[in-house]
Image: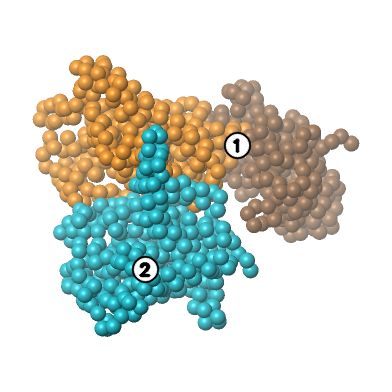
Amino acid sequence: MPEPLLSLSGVHTHVGPYHILQGVDLAVPGGGVTALLGRNGAGKTSTLRTVMGLWRASAGAIRFAGLEITKAATPDLARGGIAYVPETMSVFSDLTVRENLVLAARAGPPDAARLDWILTLFPALRTFWSVAAGVLSGGQKQMLSVARAIVEPRQLILVDEPTKGLAPAVVANMLAAFAELKRTETTILLVEQNFHFARSLADTVAVMDNGRVVHAGRMAALAADDGLQRRLLGLSLDSHQ
Amino acid sequence: MRFLRALLSDDLPRSRALSAILVAIFLGLLFAPFLFSGSQALNAAAKILYFVVLAASYDLLLGYTGIVSFAHTMFFGIGGYGAGLALYGWGPSWSSVAAGTAIALVLSVALATAIGLFSLRVQRIFFAMITLAVASVFAILASQLGWLTGGEDGRTYQVPPLLRPGFRLFEGEIGGVAINGRIVAYYLLLVTALVLFLAMLRVVNSPFGRVLQAIRENDFRAEAIGYRTVLYRSVANCVSAAVATVAGVMCAVWLRYTGPATTLSFDIMLDILLMVVIGGMGTLYGAVIGATLFLLAETYLQTLMGAISRATEGIPLLPALFHPDRWLLWLGILFIGSVYFFPAGIVGRLGRDR
Amino acid sequence: MSASLDTTLKPVVPPPDWLPLALAPVLALAALPLVGSPATWATLTLAGLAMGMMIFIMASGLTLIFGLMDVLNFAHAAFITLGAYSATLLLGPRSDWLGADSLVLNAGALLVMVALASAVAAAAGFAFERVIVRPVYGRHLHQILVTVGGLIVAQQLITAAWGPVQVALPLPASFRGIVLVGEVAVERYRLVAVAIGLVVFAAMLLVLNRTRIGLLIRAGVENPEMVEALGYRIRRLFVGVFVAGSALAGLGGVMWGFYREALTPGMGLELTVLVFIVVIIGGLGSVGGCFVGALLVALTANYAGFLAPKLALGSNIVLMVAILLWRSRGLYPVAKR
């Protein structure tokens, strides 16, 4: 079995007085989508933030593409091929859509063909090309946030709840875009509350509770096992959404 | 012992060394009129008294609530001018002192409330900036409204007869010292300082004080638990302002003079900041030690620096750096050092041994 | 489907917020009947504009430093003073240029002094960021305390170097005196100050809106974490902005020094009060707000100084309170994460 693209072993994270991650073990195989599920406060967002170097792991090891990155700084991780789409979207609201994307292309002007491809994934962004990102709708901000993460090819994308609070039509657009992205062999670590969304995309799945990964396996297996779903995910997930 | 414990609101000094220093300061202040001769020493002791109150009330804000204010001297000044101008305008009676104090307290609390309303909702930094702006404008206004305040010269006035140097409490002497009005005034200050200090100790150890500290540690969490942080901060701001006002009254009564240089100047604000940080933020005992140390340093450090300055004459720059007027330079460096290396100040350094 | 997205989710684009921009002209017009004489009014207005430009230059650095890294640098005052004092270093060597009856030589001297002031303040800012500010990033209380400590030390060092008494900073000969435009007496140096202020403002807008660095600064003001997640080292950006902000403080300081033609060690701190009011009025972190705020504060101070001299400074507090009642985070609040 090849080494996973990203792996966490025994990762602990403290934020202020709180012990949030309590020994996370997680393997994200390259080239597919891994869904990270669990109820609110289980530590999913904290896991992404710790991988991205926004919070510092107090113990344990994180490896990415064969390198130890536990102590790496956020900008170095981004340069090394990890992109981050935070839960709060965090588009730069004072900047236009264009400026947001220009900034995201760190190496130079964005590649025209790739940009064109992104704008076909998210046509709304083309329409509002010169509009300040702050006035976009929630869904459009989310599209921009994802677009910003993929404007340059990245090996691994960390995505935190891309469907949160979105209208069904936008969720469908998002799903199509991620499916397209998946076809380009980009590895995605997807935190999601919407089980339907996660099931449609993910190959592997990990479920977190109380700062630990309590289940890991094939998505297909979890999707087929109602009892396991109920036990792991409880009532907090609405599988009919 | 149980009585002492109750008096100190169960908040005893945490180490032997600290207790010893505090007891020494207390005894020194208690017997100052008999231990040190001359009005110079008594003036220094009285200054320590009202600066202990001032620094402690500032610590209530800075150390216990984590708010940086630059308006503390404004409240100090309001107290000073309140009592001073009342004595000047309405004659040297106790009712003047009382009325002046009352007016000053009302003004201080109103101002503190207004400033809090405007800035405590937003960010700590906002509060720091707004207090700096308001306080400096207040200081300039005070010096410009000459008809009322006496301008830059300030006002000199008489105090009630009981507190005048010519007054004798009784004929005899104690320990060779005649008990005149100055000594009565000194003990009036001492009792006031003690009462205020113990009251503040009570406040910080009350449930209210614990909430303040919780807010300082994590205001989001405190808010989430359901405390209205803005309200708590505003009340703390008002209490702190009120105590500073009384410290101003103490200063005005003792000096028999009130002017910008003794109350409102930004230099005094920096002095208070230095006292609290060097003494130790978040512990009222730190304010006692900080104020005492600072005021002693003000006198003795300058003497020492004068000696160094003379000794280094001929070497470029050094004499200028050790000029007695540059003593704040060295305290400033000490201040930065303490923020970095021992943020709990001297009290933190002395540690805890229980 | 994408078509329906475009139409159904069309953002309601709010019109640009022009209202604060109207405040300064409205204030100026409102003051006209109160002042009475149009000539006096014109002189006061120009004085206000000149003062506003200088305050803006000093305040813009502070507001950017704050916006980008949440550092409120109380020692900004020291850079103002330091800039002004360092210009006096050239008084000896270049006095022939200053006194010469030649606009070119005078302007050259002014330029060199201004450049020196900015450079010295920039260097001091670089050192200050390294030694004083860096260890306490992200800790607000400590930051405020440490920069206040830095202010005390810097002010004392300046006093030690140049002495506690007032130092003269004479204007080059060509920029002294007045020109009469009709009945209006226009001080030459005020025109120069307005011109320099406008150039600085235009340059800042250009950098912020047209360059990558500018985009990064604007993005960083809003969300430094996300800028890092995109692969930029925000620390480096911040050092740059800190140095540039300090240079602006020095520039503002020397301009103010020429305006007053005299320097004192406490001048930076006195100006900081106005600078803080401007930054608060404008909205912490907003350059545009800072510009409007500076004009408002300076115009108010000048009109009030003429109408009710004793209350001139109080008028700025009234202005600040009025603005905060209207917009509690300042004219142009900066979106924060």
Instruction: Look at the numbered disc 2 and give the secondary structure of its residue.
Output: loop
The figure's colour scheme reads by chain
Which residue occupies 34% across, 58% down? B73
Residue A158 in sight: no
Which residue occupies 45% across, 68% down? B25
Q: Judge whether A146 appears above or below B71 on screen.
A: above
- The residue pinned by badge 2 equals B36
Which residue occupies 30% across, 31% down? C255
Color used for chain A? brown
Q: Judge whether B65 appears above or below A205 on screen.
A: below
Q: Position of residue A173 (x, y in %)?
A: 65, 39
Within 10 angstroms of label 2, few (less than 14), some, or many (20 or more) residues?
Answer: few
Quadrant where the N terminus of chain C is found in the figure: top right
Given the current orientation, which residue lies at the most extreme right position? A1
Give the number of the mark in front: 1 or 2. 2
Color used for chain C? orange
Color used for chain B? cyan
- The residue pinned by badge 1 equals C228
- Name the chain under label 1: C
Q: Judge whether C307 appears above or below B233 on screen.
A: above
Judge by depth and name the residue closer to the eye, A240 or B9.
Answer: B9
